[in-house]
Image: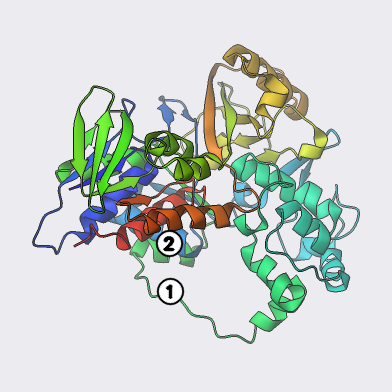
Amino acid sequence: MAAILGGGLGGLSTGYYLLKNNLNSNNKLKLFLLEATNYCGGWIKSIRTKDYVFEQGPRTIRPKGLQGLNTLNMMQDLGLSEHIAPITPDHPAAKNRMIYVRNNLHILPSTLISAFKKNQPFSKPLIYALFNDIKSPYKELQDDSIYNFVERRFGKEIADYAVSPMICGICAGDAKEISVKFLMKTLFEYEQNHGGVVKGLMASMFQSKSDSDMPLSELAKRSQEEKWNVYTIKGGLKTFPDTLQNYLVENEVNVNLNTKVEELEFIDSSSVALKSSDGNSLTANHIYSSLPSYALAKLVEKQHPELAKDLNEIPFVTVGIVNLYFDIVEPLIQPAFGFLVPPIENAPILGVVFDSCCMPDQKGTVLTVMLGGKWFKEKFGDDVTEDTLLGIATSEVEKILKIKVKPTASNVNILKKCIPQYVIGHYERVDKIREYIAANNLPISLVGCSYDGVGMNDVIYSAKKQVEGSPCTA
C-alpha cells in the first residue's frame, strides 16, 4: 500500500502516475491520498461567476520544453483538450509584457528586430548585452545568484529591469538571492565551461542535439505547430485539479479530506506509520510527500532531526493576491499580459496581470494584483489585513493604469508561505536531503514545488520521475 501526503497538484499528479504505472501489474496497488483541508488543488483556486473568473493562484501554463509537453500529454489523457485556451505569438498577451519604471509603463522587447533598437528604460539596444558578455572576464563558481550572473555577463540594466522583475513574477523572490540554476542553468554552464555565454552558444551549435523520445499527444503536437506562448483552461484553472481528483476517485484511490497527519514513524525500509490528528494510524509500504518541505519537517523531526533541519532550511515567501473586476464595457487597459515592477523601484506591489486579456470569457476588465513575496513582512508587517491590501492594490492600479472607477467586485487572499525560494545552494541541499533518505532506507519519495521546480509543469514532472524511480510501481 502507498500513501500520498497532500492533495495539491503534486499529490494528485503522483496518484495519476502511480495508477498509470500500475496498469499492467498483476498486483493492484492500494492507494491512499491524505489531504489536511476540505479540498484538493493546493494553491490553484478559481472563483467562477457568469461574468468573470478570479484566479487566486496560477492562471496560465507554459507549453514549452519536456516538462511542458508532458503536462499537455496529461491534459489530453484526462479529456481536457477541448477546454484548453491557448495564447499564440500574435496575441497581445504574448507580444506585450511590460515593466513599470520611473512612473511609466514600458513594453519589453519581444522580437529580434527590437533587440537592435533602443527601448526604454534601457539606455542601449539589448544587442549590446552580448558584447558585454564577450568582453567580460570568466569567474569560476559552483553557484551564484541569478542577479550577479546576469549583471556580470550582460550588465546591470538587464539585471535590474529584465531579470529581477521576471523573478518577482515567477517566484515572488529576490534575484540577488535566487540561484542562477533556477532559470539559467545552461547559460551558467556555458560560462563555467567555455568562459562566456556567447562562446558556449557557439560551441553548442556544433554539438549533436538529442531529442526526447517521449511520445507526444495530439494536443502537445498542436502546441508546437501553433507555437503556443502560454495556455489556460476555460472556466478557470481549477478544472485541472478537479479533473485529476475525479480520475483518482474513479480508479478507486481513497481520497481522504480533512485528514491531517501529525507524525511519520519509519518502522523499516518498507513500512511507515502515519499518525493523524484524530488518533488513528495508517501503515504504508511507501510514502509520497507532496507537502511543503517545512510541513514535512514537522512530521519527521522526532525520528530524524537532521533531515528535518535540512527540510526547514528551504525558505518560503508569502504573497498577497488581490482580484479586481470592473463591470464596464469600455476597455480600461491596453491589451497586454500585464506588467511587473522591478524591486529597484521599491513599490508596494510586484505586478499586475491583465486577466481579461489573458483568459477567455471575461466580461469587463479583470485584473490580479500581486503583493509582497520576499518583501511581504518588510512592507506590510505580520498583521496586515485583507482590507489594507485591497486599498493598496486599488490605489496602485489607479495611479499606474489611470483607472478612476471603483471595482465592481474584488477578492483578497493572503497565501502564507506559498512559494519556495531556490536560493544559492538549493540544489545541493535537495541532493543532501535525498541522499539522507537513501542512506537511511526511508520509504519516502519527495515531490512538489519544494524540490524540483516551482512551476506547474515542474511539479507534475517531478511526480512522474519520483513515481518511476520508486519501488511502488510494480
Q: Secondary structure at mark 1?
A: loop
Where is residue 222 drawn, in percent x and y? Answer: 42, 63
Query: Residue pushed farthest right?
Result: 123
The kind of residue on which mark 2 rests is: Leu
Where is residue 441 drawn, in percent x and y? Answer: 32, 56
Quarter-of-image position of residue 327: top right
Measured in 3D between alpha carbons, the distance from the residue under mark 2 to the one under mark 1, in whole angstroms, is: 11 Å
- Residue that carries the numbered disc 1 in the rendered image: 212
- Residue that carries the numbered disc 2 in the rendered image: 69
Where is residue 8 drawn, in percent x and y? Answer: 37, 39
Q: Nearer the viewer, mark 2 or mark 1?
A: 1
For the residues bearing labels 2 and 1, Cβ distance under 8 angstroms: yes
Check the image and report above or below for 451 versus 300: below
At x 48%, y 46%, the residue is 449
At x 90%, y 58%, the residue is 124
Could you tell me if residue 367 is visible in this image?
no
**Relative horizontal placement of residue 219, taking residue 25 as reference (left or right):** right
Check the image and report above or below for 144 versus 251: below
